[in-house]
Amino acid sequence: MHEMGIALEIARIALDEADKANAKKVTLLALKVGRWSGVEPETLRFALGAVCEESILEGCTIEIDFTEPTFNCEDCGKTFIAEAHFDPCPYCGSAGGPLICGDELTITHLEVDD
Amino acid sequence: MTDIAIERKVLGRNDLVADKNRQRFKARGAYVINMISSPGTGKTTVLEQTLKRLPEGLKTAVVEGDVQTKNDADRIEAIGIPVEAVVTGGACHLDAPMVGRAWAKLEAQLGDTLDLLIVENVGNLVCPSAYDVGEDEKVALVSVTEGEDKPLKYPALFHAAKTCLVTKTDLLPYLDFDVDLLIENARKVNPALKVFALSAKTGEGMQEWIEYLTEVSGGVDCE
């Protein structure tokens, strides 16, 4: 629902980084989006298409690395992908542990033409 | 062609402002709660009844978020509590800069110290949970006229919240709603969640919530 605001912030960060690198054109914008980030990847892609227009971001490839919620079991030490919050560990049945990825919303890298 | 590694959090700027807000709230001594629910759960009614029941001497202020109108802020002002409205004009959540600007205006109406700041977010069960505004805890509200599976359908909020209020319990005799099942579902998402079931209309269950809020706010100094 708030993908447009997120897209504007992504464009702002990308333009800032491209400017620092004196880039003339951004050809690729790479993001990491977790299933539990609250952001719908395809809606975000659509919003980004709109906000990138008429800037050095226009037409860039948008690459989204979609990550699954992954927990690290505190009891047996194994990692597992969860369907729902606080699914028990499928290996030992205990309550699981900290989320190690799956809620991120990050710009990971850009490819630019100088 | 050049590859630039960035690794920047998209909401990093919001988080920075949220941390600044948090420092400013702490400097006044305020405990801050961020109330989040769907539209119509009864956030404002619970808030009104909470403000009327908090112990005298517990210094409280409110930031009221709404997409349009200042109706809710007017309701709080009528109780005589300092309040600042944030009309988002379309945005579906409050973010840290909005709350920071409201706080700057609110501070002028406050004394040297504040015990409790209550932020009432825009009615929305999805987006507000992604935005830290500088609160100490998020309070998720869900009414008995919603489904028992709300926490499973919208896990992000119930996962991020520390406390959950089940509202409108006075309607239970008319509904096939299982409060225990709702609580069980909420605790699947967040085993540590503190739950208070209450009715702002009859006052049932309000006392426990008021006691909790008074305690986390540091209580009232005895004279």
Image (spheres, grey):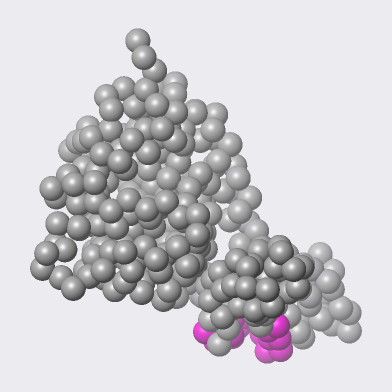
Magenta region includes residue B25: no
> Can you say which quadrant of the picture contains the C terminus of chain B?
top left
* Residue B157, x across and y down, in percent: 46, 63
Please determine whether, in this image, residue B109 is positioned above or below residue B198.
above
Tell whether A61 sits left or right of B162. right
**Residue B15 shows up from this direction:** yes
Tell whether A38 sits left or right of B115. right
**Could you say which is closer to the camera, residue B166 or residue B77?**
B166
> Can you say which quadrant of the picture contains the N terminus of chain B?
bottom right
Please determine whether, in this image, residue B34 is positioned above or below residue A68.
above
**Could you say which is closer to the camera, residue A102 or residue A57?**
A102
Tell whether A80 sits left or right of A42. right
**Could you say which is closer to the camera, residue B101 or residue B40?**
B40
| Segment colored magenta | A43-65
Residue at position x 20%, y 58% in the image: B168
* Residue B95, x across and y down, in percent: 49, 56
Residue at position x 26%, y 39% in the image: B207
Residue at position x 58%, y 56% in the image: B14
* Residue B199, x across and y down, in percent: 19, 51
Magenta region includes residue A62: yes
Residue at position x 41%, y 76% in the image: B153
Tell whether A45 sits left or right of B60. right
**Residue A55 shows up from this direction:** no
* Residue B24, x across and y down, in percent: 54, 35
**Could you say which is closer to the camera, residue B19 or residue A111?**
B19
Residue B75, located in which quarter of the rendered image?
A: top left
Q: Residue furthest left?
A: B174
